[in-house]
Amino acid sequence: MTEEKKDFFVSDISLSYQYTAGNATTRFLNKVAEGKLVAQKCPKCSAVYVPPRGSCPRCGVATEEELELPDTGAVESFTIVHIPIPGNPIVPPYVSAMIRLDGADISFLHLIQEIDLADIRIGMRVQAVWKDKSDWGTTLENIKWFKPTGEDDVDPSVFKFKE
Amino acid sequence: MIEAAVLGVGQTKYEAKRRDVSMGGLVRKAIDKAMLAADVDWDAIDAVILGKAPDMFEGVMMPELSLVDAIGANGKPLLRVHTAGSVGGSTAVIAASHVCSGNFDTVLTVTYEKQSESNATWALSPKYPYSPHINAGAGGYFAPYMREYIRRYDAPENIGWKVAVKDRLNALKNPLAHLQIPGIDENMVAETPMLWEPLRYLESCPSSDGACAMVISNKKLAESRNAAWIKGMAVRSEGTLSAGRDEVNPQGGQDCAKDIYDQAGITNPFKEIDCAEIYVPFSWYEPMWLENLHFCDLGEGWKLTERGATEIEGDIPFNMSGGVLSSNPIGASGMIRFGEACLQVTNQAGNHQVDGANVAMGHAYGGAAQFFAMWIVSNKK
């Protein structure tokens, strides 16, 4: 048998690293472990950040004041992912949405489920669906996904930042 | 005032898999062509500036070090630039800045990506610690912004298909372009699979291997040549997670464009710029950037695309080379825009030349649409 000439092959490598969450994220995640979503507020422009990063990029100042937000909000925008993403265990199609919690001034990405994909729209009201309390940890994965609340949609102008 | 000009541009053929060359061979191919076009030898090169997208793509850390021989940087000042997808553009601006500094007469700059030795969608979709695993590649990240653009201005669905067709028809005129799809039309695009709603397969950029290099020099060498003079150049960035950020029309892009127009003395970009190579990796970014870069008022971008204004014979041709939608060696994709703008104003763009192009724009963006790099070039000093 002649051996096939091979000048190119794929091999896996792995890289392990230690992640340091930092002060703001650590405080946030410790509250998430209790089922609470705690934002931080800019002392200058009053922007409310969740998850907080410890500073306001608008003003370049530290955000110290904390405030608890509800687990309800609205869809600022979204996409429906139809292709499998290498390394990602979620089976498509699934919704990746920019969720704007009530009272927050930035959105974060999370899943939306318990709805027909065709019915998802910008401005739709949603609420977090939490995992069973016994499975909670210091992670936003405590929220399984968001689901529609059935309330009236919000006007997308509410997403505009008002100083 | 900027006194720097591009003497020569070199590009490889863009392909899905350049198995005939290593990374070193790939960058050297572009460099050899750029130096030949510039008619300079290695003695003339005072410094080398290299750019590429995240090292995580190919898994080669600080590749500028292992590539030092291939890029001719032995014993010369060498700098690496890294600003995500915009890196090809910011590398060009930084290389030109080194010439303007007066410390270097002539700088060689090169950018590349060998996507076949990586998986960019994997590298852009990591699971962040303590978060659900939601990231779904660049398309997954930008699709919500495009959806919001469509909602905001009530744009018809086929605008995205139109851009996808226009850029691929341009690619047929560029022998270096990766995607060559004869007979492409809106129906063909509309029938391709949905990837990230509202984006279909043919509305998205390919994965390419390739490199682009340029030789940039001051007036001593450039004055006697058919050079592309840099009339304005700038970079801007903005915070991704900043309250009040408008992802559809980022402030950083608006400010960067305004800066280069002011430097170049341009008051009406739609009228005064003859053609532009703009970073459009996903179809809807053409109308979005038409507005962001002040070629028209907000909400009017898709109408310019619809009436054919961005076609090669239109009022403001966009991406005559086929653009990022036709060739996407990520790290080089920005520099290709900048280099193609130079080829246009020096009448070297071959079959995709815009007749009588005197002033052209190159543009790149990257990250979470938060890094911007742009320049204006002209055939007049």
Image (cartoon, coloured by chain):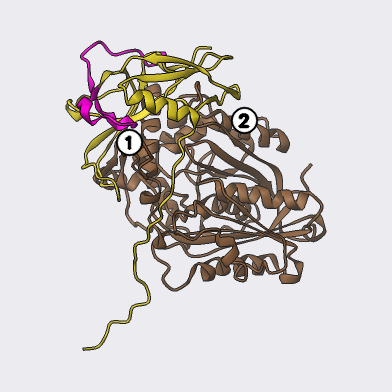
Chain colours: A yellow, B brown
Instruction: For marks 2 and 1, give the CA distance.
Output: 30 Å
Residue at the image position 81 percent from the left and 54 percent from the top:
B103
Residue under label 1, please give it: B158
Q: Chain of mark 2?
A: B
Query: Do we see residue A157 in this rendering?
Result: no
Q: Position of residue B237 (x, y in %)?
A: 58, 35
Q: Position of residue A151 (x, y in %)?
A: 23, 11
Q: Position of residue B341 (x, y in %)?
A: 60, 50
Q: Is residue A70 above or below residue A90?
A: above
| Secondary structure of residue under mark 2 | helix
Which disc, if any, is residue B255?
A: 2
Q: Is residue A22 above or below residue B175?
A: above
Which disc, if any, is residue B374?
A: none
Q: Which residues are magenta?
A: A129-158
Q: Chain of mark 1?
A: B
The image quadrant of residue B2 is top right
Q: Position of residue A130 (x, y in %)?
A: 23, 24
